[in-house]
Image (cartoon, rainbow, N blue to C red):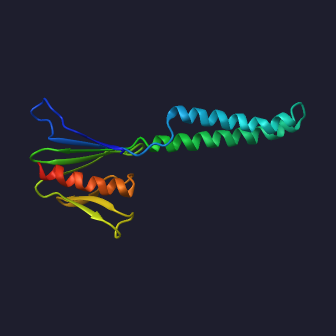
Amino acid sequence: MPYEWITPRGAPDAPQAELHLWPYRSLLRRDFVVFIAATAALITLPLLAVLGSPVVWALLPFLLAMLAGVWLALNRSYSDGEQREDLKIWQDRVTLTRHTPRKPTQTWEANPHWVRVEMHEVSGPVPFYLTLKGGPREVEIGAFLSPPERRALLGELRRALANS
């Protein structure tokens, strides 16, 4: 699962529970390099047939542009996956902090006594839309998780908030 519960210890002001969520990564950095290298190798195959002729110079800019486009798109996708959500639960407050690339950090805070975890199975923008409701507004948690992961997280969040 792309989330992890941590039970902080030590400091007197440490939260009782801490949850870190992140998007699933199907392409690791090492695999990214391997994919680009394999794509570059496959691109050179058609060039071997016309090596030594002026056709190479006509095809080369387009093939290099395609390779650069694939690299930029995968790199952008990879950097978008750097987002993270941190939920911290204390006796007197709950905070949710969302770290998103190219956007400012967003923070939500509420009293744990009033926080409700809600699952909107069909009425949300995605199936099994998971939200925290407390204070003046309702916030989504785990937007990048799959529906089974959001269903599993629902029970864990309810237990963690009940123990606070």
Which quarter of the image is occupied by the N terminus? Answer: top left
Q: Could you tell me if residue 4 is visible in this image?
A: yes
Which quarter of the figure has residue 100? top left
* Residue at x 81% of width, y 39% of height: 46
* Residue at x 22% of width, y 41% of height: 18
Q: Could you tell me if residue 111 is visible in this image?
A: no
* Count of numbered circles in the view: 0
Q: Is residue 50 left or right of residue 14?
A: right
What is the x, y in percent for residue 143?
Answer: 36, 54
Q: Nearer the viewer, residue 65 or 27?
A: 27
* Residue at x 13% of width, y 44% of height: 90
Q: Is residue 139 left or right of residue 144?
A: left
* Residue at x 55% of width, y 35% of height: 31
Which quarter of the figure has residue 121? bottom left
Q: Is residue 34 left or right of residue 26?
A: right
What is the x, y in percent for residue 85?
Answer: 31, 45
Q: Is residue 53 left or right of residue 63?
A: right
What is the x, y in percent for residue 64?
Answer: 71, 38
What is the x, y in percent for residue 91?
Answer: 9, 46
| Residue lying furthest bottom | 123
